[in-house]
Image: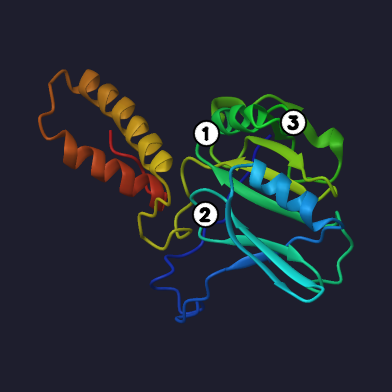
Amino acid sequence: MSTTAIRSQDATTDARVGQVDLKLEVITIPVSDIDRAKEFYGGLGWRLDADFRSGDERAVQFTPPGSQGSVHFGTNLTTAAPGSAQALLIVSDIQAARTELVSRDVAVSEVFHYAGFNRVDPRARLSGPAPERQSYRSWVSFSDPDGNTWLVQEVTTRLPGRVAGETTYTSVSEVASALRRASTAHGEHEKRTGQRDENWPDWYAEYMVREQSGEALPL
């Protein structure tokens, strides 16, 4: 399958991009049993931020590891039917993410990729990671006890403009993964040049910045 990505302009120069920060804070998950949902999301290893109660009303909030956004559920938070939500998580290593979910007794799918952009038709899912493990193309999925669906997507290199020129890592594991990729690429760089590069810290830094901003990687 051939795909063409239409890439955004640099967010710092595109006049159409808003200048006031609007940070996605929380997604509301519709559930039928608050305690059951709390046990499930806690079992994922997500951080419990709050469990507020006032009379018959209640609100519970969790944050996934490394995430700047959270989820919450409770009473009178949404009119959506339990199980109707679908949300997306991003990881840098889809196999490692699946392994951890399995270790937490989560019924998670095998790794798959899509034949196109159709996420609705099960026949569009193809077994195994994307050929050549392209960024944005490999997935797993799981559901909570109500049937709310979570897609987990592997992203290793961002498209230009997606990070607005900033290098953003939100967890130790993301930094470690980026360093390992830079180390491997640097080893190939030394093989090509036939010389030992003593200035590897600068090379690593350039690689990581370019990777996050979607620029061509150093050779």
| Circle 3 Cα neighbour tier, 10 Å, few/some/many (<14 / 14–19 / ≥20) | some
Q: Residue at x 75, y 39 (%)?
A: 142
Is 149 placed above or below 219 here?
below
* For residue 192, side relative to residue 217 (left or right): left
Is 134 placed above or below 187 here?
below
**Amino acid, disc 3:** Ser
Q: Which mark is residue 67?
A: 2
Residue at the far left: name it.
198
Q: Nearer the viewer, mark 2 or mark 3?
A: 2
| Circle 2 Cα neighbour tier, 10 Å, few/some/many (<14 / 14–19 / ≥20) | few
Q: Residue at x 18, y 23 (%)?
A: 193
Q: Nearer the viewer, mark 1 or mark 2?
A: 2
Q: Nearer the viewer, residue 64 or 1?
A: 64
Q: Residue at x 68, y 48 (%)?
A: 41
Work out which quarter of the rendered image holds the N terminus and state it: top right
Badge 2 marks a residue whose secondary structure is: loop
Rounded to the nearest whole Å, what is the CA distance between mark 2 and mark 3? 22 Å
* For residue 134, side relative to residue 55 (left or right): left
Badge 3 marks a residue whose secondary structure is: loop
Residue indicated by mark 3: 109
Work out which quarter of the rendered image holds the C terminus and state it: top left
| Circle 1 Cα neighbour tier, 10 Å, few/some/many (<14 / 14–19 / ≥20) | some
Q: Which mark is residue 119?
A: none
**Amino acid, disc 1:** Asp
Locate residue 81, reporting x and y percent. 89, 62
Res 191 quadrant in image: top left
Locate residue 153, reporting x and y percent. 62, 42
Rounded to the nearest whole Å, what is the CA distance between mark 1 and mark 2? 15 Å
Residue at the far front: name it.
55
**Amino acid, disc 2:** Ser
Residue indicated by mark 1: 93
